[in-house]
Image: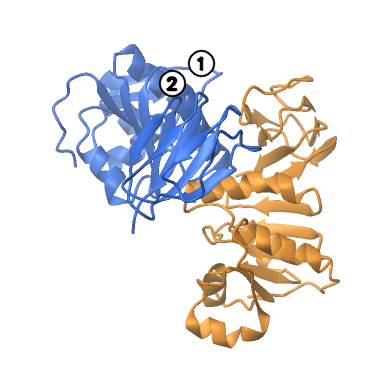
Chain colours: A blue, B orange
Amino acid sequence: MRSGKRDDGSTAIIVANGNYPRHPLPLSVIEQAPYIVCCDGAANHFIEAGGSPDAIVGDCDSISFENRIRFADRIFPDGEQESNDLTKSVRFCLERGRKNIVIVAGTGLREDHTLGNISLLADYQVEANVKMITDYGIFTPIRSRTTFHSFAGEQVSLFSIDRKPITTTGLKYPIVNRVLDNWWQGTLNESLGDSFTVDSCGKVIVFQVFGC
Amino acid sequence: MRSGKRDDGSTAIIVANGNYPRHPLPLSVIEQAPYIVCCDGAANHFIEAGGSPDAIVGDCDSISFENRIRFADRIFPDGEQESNDLTKSVRFCLERGRKNIVIVAGTGLREDHTLGNISLLADYQVEANVKMITDYGIFTPIRSRTTFHSFAGEQVSLFSIDRKPITTTGLKYPIVNRVLDNWWQGTLNESLGDSFTVDSCGKVIVFQVFGC
């Protein structure tokens, strides 16, 4: 299941409570993970798929009885009510110095969870170097000028979180120092070449869709 | 496939390009639809499942050759580049006086499409009485005080589109004349009884999760 890169203590893969990945890229991220945190009940699916989590974090009311006993030494219950299990897992990682975080299984299933999990990336980036990889692409939150590796024709969507001006270069439909009327109005753009740049002092979440 | 309520010309079900429904409620909505509009390629899946669309709207570059011939009399291509296929389909319905619109298959697959389709409900409500039914619940956009039928324990999420104050009654975590810091910060609430009310002069999208 897991070839596991050497753990230098800086990185964690978080398996969230959404649909378990089917795309090869998020699956390979799991396979090569040096350290895996499962959000509560996500542990059941992960273990069923042959995995062995390094930590299970969250309300911890959804873990099967069997797994609760088998992995008792790595269950970290957090009953705080203001945050969801993903936020608790990110906090768990940060408290242990793991600032490079990749989230998988963060979407699918209940849409309000999907929307929350994606939007929360903008909060996490304040302290973490974080990405979310889904079956369809990669979400990267930014808050300063950032250049992305890309390819001509790559589908790119921008989500503006806090109504600050955005400027892009290298995209088919350029945005020039513009505040988007609504947070999703930067969606359905397209890369023109092997890189594009998004410049904003605000919080922006960039979504790059996998090529076919 | 379709028992089809009598068509009085006021209602349309739009089958969007997301995951085709599996939950009994959106499937029954399709089955009883008086008039069905498929967004472009969604027609392929719908027809494969035994359906016969009344209209196929959008770029119309994803319809199979066979279906393009079979349903040539009800294909309405719209090559306009500023809107997605769902918006084109809503516009198609409104132009024909169909103002009661239920959208299915609007989520799943690419997350930027999911986020866009949900967010766009707030635009559609200006002219239409619109809902989106997914495999997990019902999205209803509002822009004035609205009372919802509910049940104790129903999971409810609010999405605030334009940063106007919101007041709720009948929810476990009340919001009192408050502007939400971020659009998703009204998520993961819960109904206390057989109804709840959301009051705002702004655009709010309400999500009610199906009971088990």
The quarter of the image holding the C terminus of chain A is bottom left
Foreground of the two, B151 or A56: A56
Q: Which mark is residue B9?
A: none
Kindly identify the residue that appears in the image at 86 percent across and 71 percent down.
B8
Subunit of label 2: A
Residue B210 shows up from this direction = no
* Total labels drawn: 2
Going from N to C along the chain, the mark reached first, 2 or 1, is: 1
Please determine if labels 2 and 1 lie on a single subunit: yes
Question: x and y percent of residue B196 in the render?
Answer: 79, 33
Residue A123, above or below B202: above
Question: x and y percent of residue B161 in the render?
Answer: 69, 35
Subunit of label 1: A
Kindly identify the residue that appears in the image at 75 percent across and 39 percent down.
B150
Callout 1: helix, strand or loop? loop
Q: How far separated are the C-alphas under marks 2 and 1?
A: 9 Å
Q: Amino acid at mark 2?
A: Lys
Q: Disc 2 designates what residue?
A: A88
Question: x and y percent of residue B83 in the render?
Answer: 63, 56
Q: Disc 1 designates what residue?
A: A80
Residue B35, above or below A16: below
User: Is the C-beta separation of discs 2 and 1 under 8 Å?
Assistant: yes
Question: x and y percent of residue A156 in the render?
Answer: 44, 47
Residue B161, above or below A187: above
The quarter of the image holding the N terminus of chain A is top left
Is residue A177 toward the left or the right of residue B173 in the image?
left
Q: Amino acid at mark 1?
A: Glu
